[in-house]
Image (cartoon, rainbow, N blue to C red):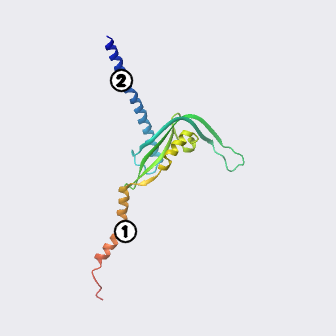
Amino acid sequence: MKKGICCFLFAILLSVQYLMPAKAADAEKEFEDIIEEQLRRTVHYYNEDSFSVIDAYGMQGQVTKIVTPDDPQTSENEEEVEEYSSHIGIVFLELEQKRDSLFIFKKEDFFYYDFDNHEFLTASNVLGNESIREFFDLYAGDIEKRITAFSQFLLLFFLSFIITIPLIIMIFHNGGLSKY
């Protein structure tokens, strides 16, 4: 009887273990969908479903927002700043930009998300947090935009026509010296 109860409890523990990662995977998929939608709205020439997360970090931290900006026409400072604590996620990802359906560029960038208010933030909103600044400094040197090797080859192939086509025309069009 004890063996049966132990096996039953062990089976329950195993099933709970498999259910927990499923919830985490669902939350991760939901966050990827949010990032995908943000990329479609904000990144020009974004090639859909082309981003991959290089690294991500989440923490409870301070968010600083300017609620009312300062009016430069007046001498007093009307700027109102709001600071609050929130669960912040920072994602360093790589995405593709496709131009003219031929040329593909790879680009790395940071995205900051406020999980409590369900909104994307700018770097100035969150870089006051030391751990987010360290994460940013870790990958800041890796931010770049570059053309892929195939697109670079294609560009050079098209540019070579500027030289080769007129040269071929000149060689085959000139039938010989003029008779006059």
Q: Residue 144, position in %: x, y?
A: 46, 52
Q: Residue 47, position in %: x, y?
A: 40, 48
CA neighbours of label 2 inside 10 A, class few (<14), some (14 to 19), many (20+): few
Asked whether, in this view, residue 20 is left or right of residue 120, the answer is left
Query: Can I make out residue 135 in this image?
Result: yes
Q: Which residue is mark 2?
A: 15
Tell me if label 1 and label 2 are in contact, CB under 8 Å: no
Quadrant housing residue 15: top left
Residue mark closest to the camera, 1 vs 2? 2
Question: Which residue is more in the foreground, 31 or 52?
Answer: 52
Quadrant, the N terminus: top left
Residue beneath the point at 52% across and 35% down: 59
Question: Which residue is more in the foreground, 6 or 128?
Answer: 6
Q: Residue 73, position in %: x, y?
A: 69, 50
Q: Which residue is mark 1?
A: 162
Rendered position, 74 above or below 159? above
Quadrant, the C terminus: bottom left
Q: Amino acid at mark 1?
A: Ile
Separation (CA) of disc 1 from disc 2: 66 Å
Which structural element holds mark 1?
helix
Q: Residue furthest right?
A: 75
Residue beneath the point at 39% across and 30% down: 21
Rendered position, 122 above or below 103? above
Q: Residue furthest bottom?
A: 180
Q: Residue 151, position in %: x, y?
A: 37, 57
Which structural element holds mark 2?
helix
Residue beneath the point at 37% across and 61% down: 155
Rendered position, 5 above or below 165? above
1 or 2: tag closer to the N-terminus? 2
Query: Can I make out residue 117 in this image?
Result: no
Q: Amino acid at mark 2?
A: Ser
